Image: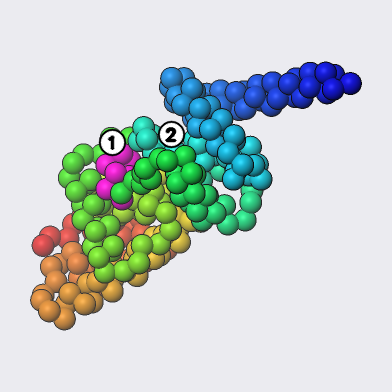
């Protein structure tokens, strides 16, 4: 009887392992990343799964942590929202819980925590879309200005995309939100609209403060007086004719 139970346990274990391998393979195909990362993801998963501290964590959530870690190690720039979407994780508060679990994961496995800085996201996204160094610099300056004076809203990737949206349109590369949605089809447009509202209020507040110390240039004045969320595309077209 004991032998039969042992054999069945081994069979179950094999099926579970096979299931994880299939999930990893599917993720690699869906995310269009190199198959050479398969062993690293599986190795991280097995190490974490064998630790009793992670025994209560579902395989899907644990796999998401392993994928997120690989993503940071290799600078693949896969967002947390994308990982959640790919693994069909619908837990409320997933993103904040995920980050806390990632910290514990690194500590228990003896891994040095890795985090992207905001500039990493800006550079990667500009490169992905094919925007030049000038737009990249403007976007980095914009997020630095906001980061130094206000609280950045949400995760870095969406902040980077919002900054690039403004920088590209200010710089004459008229890119609509629909085009951004085409490049980043897993981003919610409602989230982007909310980020644009926040960035707009921050920029206007910054220019109001600046105007108290020195004279604004023509474009800064025009933005402060005329930019609205509703007519933003029309605004950017007219903005190009304003000379400093």
Disc 1: which residue: 127
Question: In the rendering, at what x and y percent does residue 193 appear?
Answer: 45, 58
Horizontally, residue 203 falls left or right of residue 210, namely right
Could you tell me residue 57's position as x and y percent? 63, 44
| Front residue (pair 71, 238) | 71
The magenta stretch is 118-126
Q: Given contact means CB atoms under 8 Å apart, are the residues at marks 1 and 2 in contact?
A: no
Q: Residue at x 58, y 57 (%)?
A: 93
93 relative to 221, above or below: above
Residue 92: give x, y in percent of width and height: 62, 56
The image shows residue 8 at horizontal and vertical percentages of: 80, 21
Q: What element does badge 2 sit on?
A: helix
Front: mark 1 or 2: 2
**Pointer 2: what residue?**
70
Q: Is residue 52 above or below residue 44?
A: below
Residue 122 is one of the magenta-drawn residues: yes
Query: Marks 1 and 2, how far apart in space?
Result: 21 Å
């Amino acid at each position: 009887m004991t032998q039969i139970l042992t054999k069945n346990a081994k069979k179950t274990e094999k099926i579970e392992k096979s299931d994880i391998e299939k999930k990893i393979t599917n993720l690699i195909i869906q995310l269009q990343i190199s198959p050479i990362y398969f062993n690293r993801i599986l190795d991280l998963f097995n190490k974490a799964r064998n630790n009793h501290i992670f025994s209560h964590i579902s395989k899907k959530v644990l796999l998401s942590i392993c994928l997120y870690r690989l993503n940071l190690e290799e600078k693949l720039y896969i967002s947390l929202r994308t990982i959640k979407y790919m693994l069909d994780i619908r837990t409320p508060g997933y993103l904040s819980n995920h980050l806390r679990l990632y910290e514990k994961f690194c500590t228990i496995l003896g891994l040095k925590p890795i985090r992207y800085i905001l500039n990493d996201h800006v550079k990667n996204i500009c490169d992905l879309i094919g925007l030049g160094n000038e737009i990249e610099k403007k976007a980095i300056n914009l997020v630095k200005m906001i980061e130094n004076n206000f609280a950045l809203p949400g995760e870095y990737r969406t902040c980077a995309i919002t900054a690039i949206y403004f920088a590209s349109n200010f710089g004459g590369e008229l890119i609509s939100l629909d085009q951004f949605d085409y490049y980043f089809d897993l981003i919610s447009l409602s989230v982007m609209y909310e980020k644009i509202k926040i960035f707009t209020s921050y920029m206007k507040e910054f220019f109001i403060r600046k105007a108290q110390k020195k004279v604004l240039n023509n474009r800064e004045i025009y933005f402060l007086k005329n930019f609205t969320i509703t007519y933003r595309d029309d605004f950017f077209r007219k903005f190009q004719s304003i000379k400093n």
